[in-house]
Amino acid sequence: MVNDRPVDGFTAARRAMIDSQLRVSGVNEEAVLTAINGVAREAHVPAEAQALAYIDRAVPLGEGRFLAAPLFYGRMLSEAGARADDRILVVDGGSGYLPALARKFSDAVDVIDPAAATSGTGTGGYTLLLIDGAIEELPAGLASRLADDGRVVTGLVERGVTRLACGRKAGGNVALLTLAEMGIPLLPEFARPKGWSF
């Protein structure tokens, strides 16, 4: 019981996730932990998967989509350093969880799906781009939506291994630096075009 109110199972699971998955893995920023504590993961998965919402791996959403493991979001938000004055663009992996987390930091959050993110260009001027999954390459059209000096945090696939990566836009280009190997669901829309090989 907390303040003489019973704690439901999901609330207890959320606290356990923060204490036993995030804090022990180096995610200790209070703003990040407060945001994660304030968004119910069980509300972002199908009803039949709610009991799995707080496990330390990706949860299937159906149709090839996944809610990534909690550590991905914790590390992503820690690296992003989101501020109230950020204009944030979120490429949603299908759960709506990352957009809900981003809104804990800024009121200026726009959300697009992976198909829209990889086709053409859109409105620019975003100071932070968050991609909910692992990509093989960042499309130029998506990079063009970032303001100069804008930041990006995403999963990145390199030789079949997924890693958390971050970058910054400078001179019209975005360079990504890999940070940590971790299991991150793939976003097939961001696959590198296949070329000839011998």
Image: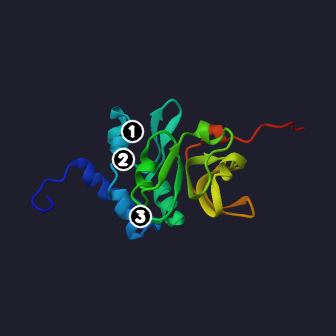
Question: Mark 2 touching mark 1, by CB under 8 A?
Answer: yes
Category of crowding for the residue at label 1, using alpha-carbon neighbours closer than 10 angstroms: few (below 14), some (14–19), many (at least 20): many
Left or right of 5, for residue 76: right
Colouring rule applied to residues? rainbow
* Identity, as a three-letter code, of the amino acid under mark 3: Val
**Outermost residue to the left:** 4
How far apart marks 2 and 1 lie (CA) works out to 7 Å
Residue drawn at (60%, 38%) of the image: 116
Can you say whether 34 is above or below 63 in the image? below
Mark 2 residue element: helix
Residue 179: x and y, percent? 61, 63
Can you say whether 179 is above or below 115 in the image? below
Q: Which residue is mark 3?
A: 32
Answer yes or no: is residue 160 visible. no
Answer yes or no: is residue 126 visible. yes
Residue drawn at (74%, 59%) of the image: 173
Q: Quadrant of the C terminus?
A: top right
Q: Which residue is mark 2?
A: 41
Residue 106: x and y, percent? 43, 59
Q: Which residue is mark 1?
A: 45
Can you say whether 30 is above or below 76 in the image? below
Question: Mark 3 touching mark 1, by CB under 8 A?
Answer: no
Left or right of 101, for residue 47: left
* Identity, as a three-letter code, of the amino acid under mark 1: Val
Residue 167: x and y, percent? 65, 62
Residue drawn at (34%, 32%) of the image: 48
Question: Mark 2 touching mark 3, by CB under 8 A?
Answer: no
Name which quarter of the figure residue 147 lies in: bottom right
Mark 3 residue element: helix
